[in-house]
Image: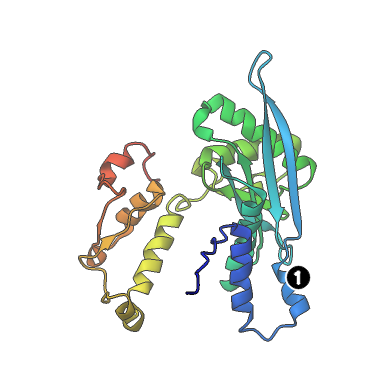
Amino acid sequence: MPTTVATKEDLNFNRIVSKQFDRAANYLKIHPALLSQIKACNNVYYFQFPVRFGGDHFEIFEGWRAEHSQHKKPVKGGVRYSELVSQDEIMALAALMTYKCAIVDVPFGGSKGGIRFNPKKYNEEQLEKITRRFTAELIRKEYIGPGENVPGPDVGTGEREMAWMADTYDTFHPGGIDNLACVTGKPVEQGGIHGRREATGRGVQYGIREAFQHAEDLKKLGLTTGLEEKPSSSRDLATSAITLRNFYPKKMDARSSASPSGMPLSTIRKGFPSRT
């Protein structure tokens, strides 16, 4: 009797993205050498940096900034703070930024950055020191700057961190008329734009709306078109869930919960600043 050997799924994010690229590339009439160049991550900057939290208390942090492609400038991509940050993850996310921008014809190359640590274990003063020190390292190697490499918010970061990064860049480049353009996702009062905070949730809304207009695809899943009376899945990012609920038109009224336990969005909203 033949035996079946279970194969372990490859969960390496960078290899997963590369396989997705290869599948899509099969439909393109592009020379393999050029496809290899498009897929490759051009630069990855890995560094360790110390942060002093007072007295003799020092901690060492690991940081990354990847530039997947400079075919268009600036390169663009968020900065995330998480214990799960790794070089493979940063390279994969930078690649996805390149592909996303290219598909919708946005003239940016892809980039991504991050620090491996749990931001919930640090107070605001400590987070500011970590962020400014990280930014200083990016400045020294020219991995941040208007028209060159422009970070934005991501997992574990937001408007506050972007304001710290912009201020640090401005300190290193006094008098620069476009210094605030070194990052996106800043607070509105510090050069940010209205709607940035809600952008991810709006993207979810539009994506769901479009997906539920294709009857043939939905039939395979046992679903019907339209969003009336359909439950929406739980969202890991509460901000997106809140925004999604706020922007859903009445004709798209979907029953939603922000957690598997059914916690109301109004409860989660208490922990977040109000929309601008």
Depicted 30 relative to depicted 18: above or below: below
Q: Residue at x 53, y 42 (%)?
A: 157
Q: Nearer the viewer, residue 147 or 75?
A: 75
Q: Nearer the viewer, residue 12 or 192?
A: 12
Q: Nearer the viewer, residue 5 or 268?
A: 5
Q: Residue at x 64, y 64 (%)?
A: 98
Label 1 Cα neighbours within 10 Å, binned few <14 / some 14-19 / many ≥20? few
The image quadrant of residue 56 is top right
- Which residue is the extreme one toward the left? 229
Q: Is residue 231 left or right of residue 122?
A: left
Query: Visible in this render: residue 146?
Result: no
Name the residue carrying label 1. 37
Q: Nearer the viewer, residue 226 or 87?
A: 87
Percent across and percent down for residue 137 are: 74, 38
The image quadrant of residue 23 is bottom right
- Which residue is the extreme one toward the bottom? 29
Depicted 225 relative to depicted 50: above or below: below
Q: Residue at x 37, y 73 (%)?
A: 211
Query: Visible in this render: residue 227?
Result: yes
